[in-house]
Image (cartoon, rainbow, N blue to C red):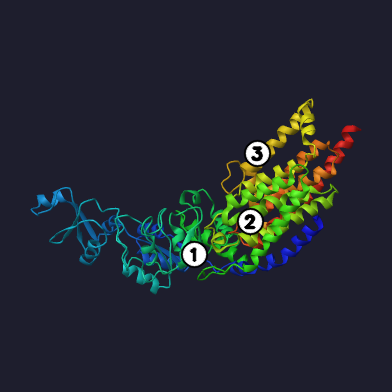
Amino acid sequence: MKKALNLLLLLALVPSLFSLLPRLEAERPGPVVLVMDGKALEEEARSRGESFLEAFRRYQAQGVVGVSLYESTVRDWVDRGSLLLKRGLELKEEGLPARPGWFYLKGDKGLLDLLQTAYTLPTHALPGYLGFPIDPSFLPALYDPSLAQALKTAGAYLVYRPSNHPLRVLREDLIPKEADAVVFAGTEALGFPHRLEEAKALVRVPVAWIEGTPQEGFNAFQEAGVLRLFSLKPEWQLTLKPKEAADKFVLAARERGHQLLYLRPYPYPVDTALFLNRLKEELAASHIPLGVPRVRTFTPSPLRHLAWVGVLSGLSLLGLGLSAYGPLVAGLLLLFALGYGGSQGGALLAALVFPTLGFLGPRNGLWMWLRSLGYALAGVVFLSALGSTPGAVLGLTPFKGVFLTLIVPPLLVLYSFLPKDFKEALSRLFHHPLRLGEVGFGVLGLALLALALLRRGNDAPIVPDWELKLRALLQEAMVRPRFKEVFGHAVFLLALFLPWPRWVQNALLGVAAVGMASILNTFSHFHTPLPISFFRVINGAVLGLALGGIGVILGRRLLRWWWG
């Protein structure tokens, strides 16, 4: 039965691999466009006595061909001198029949005509004035069409940033015809929550998804096409040296598929120049061209459904390999994955099952490690085939169960070590006299496991400075592997090639299973291009083998010295 299931698993790999071709084609890096933040550019232009267009042309000469144009607020128009804002009481004192408590605007007649129909608010017209019952200072107030046209004439890649507001009217001219892309300002998409269909009809250019900044209602605009945007928060950028900041943008373009690199200048021009020069040099070194970004979309291959054959074969192997209640555990896993994962149930099931399979066979040294790695990589193919949808690859549909993929496989591995008569084994374990060394090993193992789980994600709370420096060093030399995988492979060798008591070896193999589970976890980040994830895993295996080999040699010498 096991041979037949392994044969089915191997056969299912072929169509599953072919089903990944559309995604691989869509994931080709570049072109990317450098986009300067419009608010930062406007502030810098004012400090230098330049116009917005002059400031843009200065950066355009340095390779930044994109610029964002924010939708203005009424206060912006007042600050620019295009409008004057007065309270109704002031006008009443001047002899005009203004309404006390209202707010009145005076200025450019064409702009006032537009604002009169821009909101669902009642208005009050006076000679030369337009009144509103609330302070309109922070209401969205369209854009400067002459500036948009001038930027487009100058060759700008124009990114428009409209604001959502419940009082605004969604009018046909809300998005400039010169816009190449739209990036919603704030944490809501235009029209959220009740007018998304109306707003969607107005957006006819691609919209950009900002990594790390979820925007309510964004998914409604997928039909227009989605681009991936990376930026650094201004306060964080100021803590980084220009070289460090540039490297983060390059990493985002190379390893996470970002196409709009959204930049802000440093306070000092010399730092901004260093930042831009480093960014362009590293993009060129990574063979990522500058240009107009294209919408990355693909149609998932129907061959992907055959990956279910491989996943169910792996699940059956798990059920047969567990000595205690194997079929029951496999059935519960299937029900849980389908119930919790929904449309991602197959991918989740692959991530939970395949890191475990290699630990179910004989402990035959390096072959056990190779078997475990092979099953994990097979699981990667099935996970990627079933989970690679356009929404997942763009990062719009996060993978369900990222945490579970790190904790369930090690628990299954430890469970697999229970004998068939597990009641007697548990009874012996309960009555086993504790030794200080065993307690120390147990505490150390739990600490390492907790550390691995707490350090998951880009914003992990426990990452020492030395590790950050090591990450940066590895990142410059290669596609940086995940440290959980490196240490998982190393612990695997230590567990197999040093003379441990059986319970210690079992515990170490449980820790090693975290490394195998991390392989599937790596590929569950679907927004990372497949080749990047592949080389990350290979580099982790090579470094882990080297580290583990050194550990085995040192461990054996230490034992010889200790025991004389």
Tell me residue 524's x, y (percent): 62, 55
**Residue in front for this viewpoint, 374 or 62:** 374
Instruction: Determine the residue located farthest toward the right in the rendered image.
Output: 564
Q: Which mark, residue 352?
A: none
Residue 186 in the figure: left or right of residue 379: left
Residue 547 in the figure: left or right of residue 112: right
Q: Residue at x 76, y 28 (%)?
A: 430
Q: Is residue 383 visible?
A: yes
Q: Which mark, residue 450?
A: 3
Q: Quadrant of residue 6?
A: bottom right
Tell me residue 414's x, y (percent): 74, 41
Sequence-wise, which precedes: disc 1 or disc 3?
1
Q: Amino acid at mark 2?
A: Ala
Q: Amino acid at mark 1?
A: Val
Tell me residue 194's x, y (percent): 36, 56
Image marks 1 and 3: residues in contact by CB distance under 8 Å: no
Q: What is the secondary structure assignment of the residue under circle 1?
A: strand
**Above-or-below relation of 106 to 560:** below
**Residue in front for this viewpoint, 562 or 425:** 425
Q: Residue at x 72, y 51 (%)?
A: 355
Q: Quadrant of residue 252?
A: bottom right
Q: CA distance from mark 1 to mark 3?
A: 37 Å
Residue 324 in the figure: left or right of residue 268: right
Q: What is the secondary structure assignment of the residue under circle 3?
A: helix
Sequence-wise, which precedes: disc 2 or disc 3?
2
- The quadrant in which the N terminus is found is bottom right
Q: Which mark, residue 347?
A: 2
Residue designated by label 1: 226
Label 3 Cα crowd, 10 Å radius (few <14 / some 14-19 / many 20+):
few
